[in-house]
Structures are given as structure tokens and as C-alpha cells.
């Protein structure tokens, strides 16, 4: 067997979005294949017979075919596609397949459709951005009336509001059902095919606060069912349409608040009941994994029979649970892995899962009658050809008595009498997590002679809300946790070279990398990607800065200038002794490009060693969503920089 190579990423098939038919006998899914030669991704929708495993049907135009959804009868599938759109154009189209022959175009819109689902056998519902004012036809300018002016991955958005549309399957005619001043977040059809429950934002200044409403398609009536006192991200119906299951939080601890499973009546307005509050764990996957690819789908809680099924983040793992209306919680599937998506057939208890573990890329598994079996085998070649480093787990008791989960990989083909450099990875978020999920970048570093160390310090998900709460204290307990994990690791592993340490991270991980090099000279090299250096600038420029920063840093820069400065690495640039490589993508509206340019300029003014690489394309998630050539160059840049600065003789692979 051989070591992992950079070009292997382009051979990995990213499998996503499993969707079981109503009877559970067929399975639709999406594959995404990096095409390094043409610098794009090839999408394909595959349909399988679950009993035999045979491929029944393939939908592929290599133009972004995705989001397959079944009709109530299970005889049709709708999906969205970029067919007919130029690369520089936005928008998509809806196509219908009857599971044979060429799919038929139903509707096309330059603003595009999302969350396309069957309302009944003859009608669809979808969400689409809708112009709220006249736009410049030549595209020379945009006119901004509200906030935010832009959103990461979408560009300028103020001139649009996301609304619900009703689409006739046969004619393709569509009509707008809602005319909200704020965006529709999520919409779900009732099982009767007559109503739509939906989640809507209510305040631009507080965009996470939502209300829940029901639209009666037959009567044209629209009424509120849950007042805007919560932050819900989805709504679904009970099998008898008498209840709604909601996913979200009460925001009592701000953005740190866990998402829970709530239930309310669909008949009369009322306060929802939290069924999972006693768990004190988040019910949405947040495990870092760069093997999922650019197409990622959210799985809402799903109600089958007497139970609501959902995912729970637990100490680096994402497991499957269920709860009934009495609040009795039961773990269905638990282990050293992370589940990211799942689908339950309406007329069967068969469950399809998108699952990944420490040595296996994401694949689809089927769970039923207490047993689980691997259904897809797109990436079996990887485990047969490539030698992966074993994942080792540590529980580190830190100085305030708390326990912090940490993991490390050993260098491939490690020799006992040699010392090896160490690279510390820091996850994004901060309310995200690491765990037993295969990461290409981690294994690539191990394949090139590095120890790889990562952990879940304070601020991470998968633990209590108190553990996750570092608001107004960025760079304090979280920083100490990371540094104490590093020292515990070095004490435990004698072949780790204490003089050749590197540190790297993206987003919050980029912030923490910037922060670390201003606080200690323990590291010999650092790579910071799309991180924060100046919270003041972030408040004014980021798409979420005006509401995220007050929650996390405290108030606004006008009211708390001292706090914003105190937690901004750029104001400590003169302390830096560690050489640093700053990588940023030009179209990042989450952590704006000015963050890395500011830190680079500050470091240079103090004659510090800093390099800045700006990718001219790519949003905040450039490490996983950027085009294949961009991703390959990123791997090369990071590996080569650490090879140089940590004096690693390993050649680029």
C-alpha cells in the first residue's frame, strides 16, 4: 500500500443527500466527482433498488443535477439542475423524471429554486429569491436599502427576498404564494397536500429570530402558528398533520444555545414544547470533515410513527436518536463515527444514512431492524490502495479541571529512533468540533511525515452549552485549552519534536491561529486561512458581523471599543515571532478579505515574517467548495510552507 497523495482528492467520489422512496424500496442519491482536468465538478443523481443494490436509473448532465425528491406515490422524482445556464449566470431549473427516459423541464428561473418538494402528485412548492425593487438591467450597480448588503456564497442580496412558489407539474406554470418583507427560511408540505408550514425571518437586525406560519393552499389563508420568540431552522409535519416538529433554539444563551426538537399544534397558535432540552447537546451535525465535498445538505428532524428522529453531537461524534411526544429519548445508533444526513421512508422504518469514520470516506449505509450495512462503495479503492494513519484519542484534564477531547495521527511509516514535526489543527466555528471523521488534509500531513494534533477546546460543539460559551472571552480559556493539549501531547509522545511545531486553522481556526502567534512563540510556523484579525472591521464588513459580533464579542464597536480591540490579534502584531502564511479567498463575505490584509500589513510594519496568498475566486468555504484546481493548489501551498519552515525533508507529493 502507498501513502496518500495530493491528487488523490480528485479521485474521491463525494456522495450526498440520500433520499428513500415513500415505500423504502428505492433510494436516490447524488454523487459529485472533482474534474481536475476541466476544473469543475460533475454531478450525477443515481437511483437504486434497495433490496438488490442494482442501479435502476442515472440522471447526469454534468451540470449540477442535485436535490432529488420523491412524489407521494414514489413514481416521480423532481430535481434542480444548472442545465442551460452559463457558468457566470445564477439560477437553476426544475426537472421531472418518471424514472425512465430523459427528464423533462418543468420550470426555469434566473434567481433559481431551492427546497423543491411535492405538495401533492400534481403540484410542487419551492423557495426562490424574488426581486423587491427594480434592478439595474445592465448589472452596473446595485442599490442597497437594508442589511446585510451581501451574503457569503450568494453575493449581493438586498434586492431580493426568498418567497414560496407553487408550481404545476404538467404546465410548469408557477405563482408566488407569499409576499414577505423578510426571507422565508424553510417550507414543508403537509401530508394531505393542502397546506404548507413555513419558517420566516421577522427582523433584519435580528435575522435568527423567526416565526412559524401555515399557508392553506386551497383556501388561500395564511396564519401565524408560533410567535417570533425563537430561532427555528426547519419545520415538518406529523404523519397525521396534527402537529409540527420544529428544529431550533430559544436563544437564551445567544448563539451558543443548542438546537433542540420542539413540537406544537398545527391547529391553533401556541408555544412549542421542547422535547430534548434535558440532553444539553446540540441536535445538528457540526463535526469537521473535508471529505464531504462541495454539495452539503441539511437533514431536518423526521417524524415516523410515534417517534421523531434526529442527530446529536456528542464529544466529536454525531449519532442517531429519536424522541416521542412524552419526551422519552432513545439512542438508535451510536459509535465512533459521524452521521451527517439521513432519510426515513414514510411507509417503512428503513433509514438511509450518510456516515463517515476515521478511515472511511462518506458513504451511504442502510439501517433497519437494529442492523446496519454499507450500501455504496464509491471509495473502497481508497482503503485498498492507500495507507491511512491510525487515529489516537486523548482525554486531557486541563488546568481548571475540565476534560478536553483530543486526537492525533502518527506519521506514516514512522521510525522509532526519529523525531517528527507536529502540526496543530484548530476547527472553525467556534461552535464546531473534531472527531473520528476522516479529513483529507490531516491524512495528507501524516503521509508526509507529520504528527497531526487536533482537539475540541472550550467553545466547541458536542458538549454542554456552558462548555461552548466563550462569548466575550475569545482567546482566553479556548487558547489555554489548546496550549495545554499541546503540552500533554508532547509529554505523551516522545517522538514528537518539541522544536518543530506548526499551527493552522480556518475561520475561527484562522482567528485562533492569528491569536496564538501574538501570545506565544511556541510555534515555528503558522498557516491562517480566512480568519479574523480585527473584530472592529469584521463588524462593519462581514455579512453576519452586525449580529454575530455583538453576541460573541459584546455590543458594538461603538459601545465596546475596548473589548473589540482586546480580542483582535492585529493590535498585538508587534509581539509576533512566528513566521506566518495567510491564505484568503477574495469572495469571502463571512470573514472579509480585509482581515488577512490588515494582519499582513501590521506584521510587515513591525518587520515580521508574513506571506499573503489571495485566491481571486472562492467564498468563505473555499477549502471544500472551491473548484478542484484551487483546492489542489491550497494543499500544495500549505504542505510546502510547513515543509520549509519546519525543516521537513519530505518531498511534495
Image (cartoon, grey):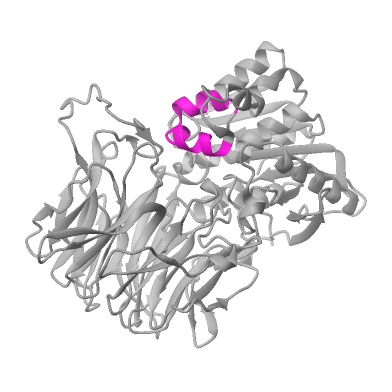
**Residue drawn at (79%, 59%), measured in percent from left and top?**
395
| Res 216 → quadrant | bottom left
Which is the main secondary structure of the residues drawn in magenta? Answer: helix
Can residue 354 be seen here? The reply is: no
Q: As drawn, is 54 to the left or to the right of 427?
A: left
Q: Position of residue 316 (x, y in %)?
A: 64, 60
Asked if 184 appears above or below 260 in the picture, the reply is above
Asked if 539 appears above or below 232 in the picture, the reply is above
Q: How many numbered markers are drawn? A: 0
Q: As drawn, is 147 to the left or to the right of 405?
A: left
Q: Position of residue 555 (x, y in %)?
A: 53, 31
Quadrant location of the N terminus in the rendered image: bottom right
Closer to the camera, 429 or 274? 274
- Is 537 part of what is drawn in magenta? yes
**Residue drawn at (34%, 83%), measured in percent from left and top?**
25
Closer to the camera, 307 or 286? 307
**Residue drawn at (58%, 56%), measured in percent from left and top?**
287
Q: Which residues are magenta?
A: 533-552
Amino acid at each position: 500500500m502507498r501513502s496518500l497523495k495530493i491528487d488523490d482528492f480528485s479521485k474521491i467520489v463525494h456522495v450526498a443527500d440520500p433520499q428513500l422512496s415513500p415505500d423504502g424500496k428505492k433510494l436516490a442519491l447524488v454523487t459529485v466527482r472533482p474534474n481536475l482536468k476541466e476544473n469543475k465538478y460533475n454531478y450525477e443523481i443515481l437511483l437504486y433498488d434497495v433490496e438488490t443494490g442494482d442501479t435502476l436509473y442515472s440522471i447526469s448532465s454534468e451540470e449540477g443535477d442535485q436535490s432529488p425528491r420523491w412524489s407521494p406515490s414514489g413514481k416521480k422524482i423532481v430535481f434542480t439542475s444548472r442545465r442551460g445556464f452559463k457558468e457566470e449566470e445564477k439560477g437553476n431549473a426544475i426537472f421531472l423524471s418518471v424514472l425512465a427516459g430523459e427528464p423533462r423541464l418543468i420550470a426555469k428561473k434566473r434567481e433559481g429554486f431551492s427546497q423543491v418538494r411535492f405538495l401533492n402528485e400534481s403540484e410542487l412548492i419551492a423557495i426562490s429569491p424574488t426581486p423587491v425593487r427594480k434592478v439595474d438591467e445592465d448589472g452596473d450597480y446595485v442599490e442597497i436599502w437594508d442589511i446585510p448588503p451581501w451574503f457569503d456564497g450568494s453575493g449581493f442580496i438586498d434586492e431580493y427576498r426568498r418567497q414560496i412558489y407553487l408550481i404545476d407539474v404538467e404546465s410548469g406554470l408557477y405563482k408566488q404564494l407569499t409576499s414577505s418583507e423578510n426571507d422565508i427560511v424553510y417550507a414543508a408540505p403537509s401530508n394531505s397536500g393542502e397546506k404548507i408550514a413555513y419558517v420566516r425571518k421577522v427582523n433584519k437586525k435580528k435575522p435568527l429570530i423567526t416565526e412559524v406560519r401555515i399557508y392553506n393552499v386551497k383556501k388561500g389563508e395564511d396564519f401565524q402558528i408560533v410567535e417570533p420568540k425563537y430561532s427555528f431552522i426547519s419545520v415538518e409535519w406529523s404523519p397525521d398533520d396534527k402537529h409540527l416538529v420544529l428544529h431550533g433554539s430559544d436563544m437564551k444563551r445567544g448563539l451558543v444555545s443548542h438546537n433542540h426538537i420542539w413540537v406544537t399544534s398545527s391547529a391553533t397558535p401556541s408555544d412549542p414544547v421542547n422535547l430534548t432540552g434535558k440532553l444539553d447537546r446540540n441536535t445538528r451535525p457540526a463535526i469537521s470533515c473535508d471529505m464531504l465535498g462541495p454539495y452539503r445538505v441539511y437533514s431536518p428532524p423526521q417524524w415516523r410513527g410515534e417517534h421523531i428522529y434526529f442527530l446529536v453531537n456528542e464529544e466529536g461524534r454525531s449519532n442517531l436518536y429519536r424522541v416521542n411526544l412524552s419526551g422519552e429519548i432513545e439512542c438508535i445508533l451510536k459509535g465512533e463515527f459521524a452521521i451527517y444526513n439521513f432519510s426515513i421512508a414514510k411507509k417503512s422504518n428503513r433509514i438511509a444514512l450518510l456516515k463517515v469514520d476515521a478511515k472511511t470516506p462518506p458513504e451511504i449505509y442502510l439501517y433497519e431492524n437494529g442492523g446496519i450495512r454499507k450500501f455504496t462503495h464509491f471509495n473502497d479503492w481508497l482503503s485498498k490502495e492507500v495507507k491511512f494513519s491510525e487515529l489516537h484519542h486523548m482525554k486531557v484534564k486541563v488546568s481548571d479541571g475540565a476534560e478536553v477531547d483530543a486526537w492525533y495521527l502518527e506519521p506514516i511509516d514512522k521510525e522509532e529512533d526519529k523525531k517528527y514535526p507536529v502540526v496543530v489543527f484548530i476547527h472553525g466555528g467556534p461552535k464546531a468540533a473534531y472527531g473520528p471523521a476522516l479529513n483529507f488534509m490531516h491524512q495528507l500531513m501524516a503521509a508526509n511525515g507529520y504528527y497531526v494534533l487536533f482537539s475540541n477546546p472550550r467553545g466547541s460543539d458536542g458538549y454542554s452549552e456552558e462548555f461552548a460559551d466563550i462569548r466575550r472571552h475569545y482567546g482566553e480559556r479556548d487558547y489555554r485549552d489548546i496550549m495545554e493539549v499541546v503540552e500533554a501531547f508532547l509529554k505523551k509522545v516522545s517522538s514528537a519534536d518539541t522544536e518543530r511545531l506548526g499551527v493552522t486553522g480556518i475561520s475561527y481556526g484562522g482567528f485562533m491561529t492569528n491569536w496564538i502567534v501574538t501570545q506565544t512563540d511556541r510555534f515555528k510556523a503558522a498557516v491562517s486561512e480566512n480568519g479574523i484579525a480585527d473584530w472592529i472591521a469584521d463588524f462593519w464588513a462581514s455579512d453576519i458581523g452586525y449580529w454575530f459580533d455583538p453576541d460573541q464579542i459584546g455590543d458594538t464597536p461603538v459601545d465596546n471599543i475596548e473589548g473589540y480591540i482586546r480580542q483582535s490579534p492585529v493590535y498585538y502584531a508587534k509581539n509576533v515571532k512566528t513566521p506566518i502564511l495567510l491564505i484568503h479567498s477574495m469572495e469571502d463575505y463571512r470573514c472579509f478579505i480585509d482581515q488577512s490584509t490588515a494582519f499582513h500589513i501590521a506584521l510587515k510594519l513591525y518587520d515580521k515574517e508574513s506571506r499573503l496568498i489571495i485566491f481571486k475566486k472562492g467564498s468563505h468555504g473555499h477549502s471544500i467548495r472551491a473548484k478542484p484546481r484551487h483546492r489542489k493548489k491550497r494543499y500544495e501551498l500549505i504542505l510546502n510552507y510547513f515543509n520549509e519552515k519546519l525543516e521537513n525533508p519530505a518531498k511534495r507529493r
